[in-house]
Amino acid sequence: MAIAEPSTPRTPPSGRQLLIQLLIVVVVMAALVVAIIGLLPGSGRRLSHVTADWIVVAVVLELAAMASYWWTFDLFFSRPPYRIGKRLSLQIGIGELGAFVIAPFGAGGPVVRFWALLKSGMPWTVVITRAVAHDLAFNLPYLVAALLLGSSAALGIGPGHASLDLSLSPLGVAAIVIAGGLWLLWLGKRHQRWLSTRPADAPAPDIARWKWWTVQALAAVPAGLQELFVRFREPQAVISSFGFWVGDCAVLVVGIHAAGGSAPVAVVALAYMLGQLGNLLPLPGGVGGFEPIVAAVLGASGVNLGLAGAAIILYRLVSLGLQSAGGAICIATLPASLRTRLQLKDAPVPL
């Protein structure tokens, strides 16, 4: 029996599940605000300095970051011969971005992505290949910035300060990621050579389905890396991959100024990049992991802790709020868009 494609993975959360998850995010964010105000004296007073115009600026920057994520998603996933269109790219891209926020470890993001792309008719191997290229492109700017800023802080040559362990953490994460990537690349080339010796119409070997899909996924890793190099020849792919991190980090910079203070951009960027390590914790949106790291780095760099707390609160409310709300809307409308796409694709061609 041939098994060329996996069955469609489980559907994304239903409307009721999304509402429950959003309520959980709201409760967690409310608890976060109370905790920061209680632990960092002056945060509440600093928040009173925030005016509507600063909030508008923060919202515009976060929307620009989300639009950049959509742009990156569209550039990597919606290309011939499997175009999915701008609207569907928007719904899947922002939907998975929101699912990263509302699910621990960001597990909801891959579910939304793979379900929607496979449902749209994109072959499994194409989805995997483009996913490898997209994820490398999206995370590469963060990895480079975190390594540069973390190393400069560890060596004491940059404007920001952090503990040695924290500063060197990105180096450890990078070493693990690079080692894991090289291992997957080696496995991928082995499986790619094995698959190339099999006829195109050959049935799947007599192994469990998940093992056969894993073989195909690993074989797509080298192709995904090659795809990344091809896409990065296009300036828009490079610009869009940096856009999300720049826009999202800029919201934290605005938070500092909105709370009536200031700090060097490099210091805020260092705190932001190291704070992303908190997303490694099994918490929705990294809540509870991001905040202590950012506050510690800003405090060690001479930023008033009350100011840091107020900036973190504003950043989290804008960033998590827009991503989770936008993602929920996109996920809720995604099934209808997929049905319309399938109906149009299957419609008879007029003579």
Image (cartoon, rainbow, N blue to C red):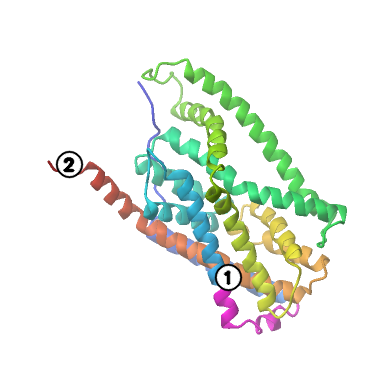
Q: Main secondary structure of the magenta part?
A: helix
Residue 283 location in percent, x, y? 61, 56
Please name the residue that numbered disc 1 is placed on. 317
Up/down of 32 relative to 174, above or below: below
Front residue of 79/348: it is 79
Tag 2, which secondary structure?
Answer: loop
Is residue 35 inside the magenta stretch?
A: no
Q: In which quarter of the image is the C terminus?
A: top left
Residue at 39% from the left image edge and 53% from the top image edge: 86
Residue 107 location in percent, x, y? 53, 49
Q: Is residue 88 left or right of residue 247?
A: left
Evaluate if marks 1 and 2 touch, with contact meaning CB atoms under 8 Å apart. no
Q: In which quarter of the image is the N terminus?
A: top left
Residue 299 location in percent, x, y? 80, 68
Tell me if mark 1 has few (under 14), some (14-19) or many (20+) residues whose alpha carbon lies within 10 angstroms of its own.
some
Q: Is residue 161 left or right of residue 117?
A: right
Q: Mark 1 or 2, which is nearer the eye? A: 2
In the rendered image, which quarter is residue 251 located in?
bottom right
**From which residue to which does the magenta span run?**
39-57
* Residue 27 visible at all: no
Separation (CA) of disc 1 from disc 2: 49 Å
Please name the residue that numbered disc 2 is placed on. 349
